[in-house]
Image (cartoon, rainbow, N blue to C red):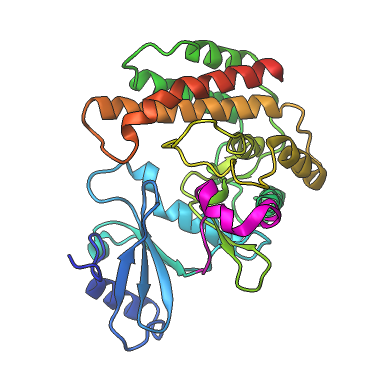
Amino acid sequence: MSADHPPGLDLDRLRDHLDRARPGLLGPGPLTARLVEGGRSNLTYTVTDGDTRWVVRRPPLGHVLATAHDMRREHRVISALHPTAVPVPRPVLLCEDESVLGAPFYVMEFVAGTPYRTAEQLLPLGPERTRAVVLGLVDALVDLHAVDPREVGLADFGRPEGFLDRQLRRWGKQLAASRGRELPGIDELHAALGRTLPASPAPAVVHGDFRLDNVLIDSSDGTDRIAAVLDWEMSTLGDPLTDLGLLAMYSVRLEVPDSPVSTTAGAPGHPDPAELVERYAARSGRDVSAVSWYTAFAWFKLAVILEGIHYRYTLGQTVGAGFDRIGELVPLFIEHGLTTLQEG
């Protein structure tokens, strides 16, 4: 496959389908496409007819669990949120006919903007703009959690009852499935989280992976606004404070030289977790007194994810830059989780 015809995207079939389903959408020019790097699981392509650009999302190539790469869910949540204050790309269509591309896919409008994945990438913005961008991220989270799921047709988008308990059990099972070494403290952390489970507030639409590198920042008019929140594959109805805990965790500086896990927290001007939590509380009116639990849970979840990568790496099942050092980070994440929970 050439760069203009990336694997997993048959442009002739895509054009035929779009011409039938959305006549007049495409111009007469030939379609070209490229695979967007940086996504963790589902494949993302930009497609253009020479005048207009769109984005196509489809599951990864090869055998995958249908529930983990549910295009219908992603398309449904951005369709529901598009008329709200939450910045998401405009959906174009969902195709569940696997004969077109070999898997279900959806098409959305292309949104111009920059994803900031590392502290180094934020340096050109300077401290003041960096601070404003990250505070804007909190405001977007408040807007998301203010959406009434029933009003946008998402009343049945998840099972909020027992959400935290299910999450804890799920990540405990993930940990059991990737145990290849002793990890001091991780069972203690898991048990402590189970003993101190907070009572969840009213359910909201939860993004599930809300952080700076999952949004696009548009600086074209000099305002550094969030143009779009992306990667909705983990979204559901649940406890909104899980999103806040994850954002707080990603805002802690990791003093690890050349860390294989990207974090923007070390950029000059980046607000600390306490300021982000305060802003969220002030703007949302929510009780955030249990935020240390949610942050500790985020440390636990990331420790389990990293241990899974490390485990597959030791079995020779996965390769990638920095994967040989992922295992070193797991004890640090466990320690942060325990400390966060103890200090409250």
Name above or below for residue 250 compared with residue 36: above
Residue 266 image offset from top left, x and y in percent: 59, 41
Kindly identify the residue that appears in the image at 70 percent across and 25 percent down. Answer: 199
Name above or below for residue 229 compared with residue 189: below
* Residue 166 in view, yes or no: no
Instruction: Assign the C terminus to one quadrant of the image.
Output: top right
Is 31 on the left or on the right of 40, as rendered?
left
Is 180 on the left or on the right of 274, as rendered?
left
Instruction: Assign the N terminus to one quadrant of the image.
Output: bottom left
Kindly identify the residue that appears in the image at 52 percent across and 61 percent down. Answer: 114
Give yes or no for residue 291 being in the magenta stretch.
no
Kindly identify the residue that appears in the image at 59 percent across and 41 percent down. Answer: 265
Secondary structure that dominates the magenta span:
helix
Is 274 on the left or on the right of 234, as rendered?
right
Give yes or no for residue 126 being in the magenta stretch.
yes
Name above or below for residue 319 compared with residue 71: above
Residue 224 figure quarter? bottom right
Foreground pick, 66 / 244: 244
Residue 280 image offset from top left, x and y in percent: 75, 43
Magenta segment boundaries in residue numbering: 111-132
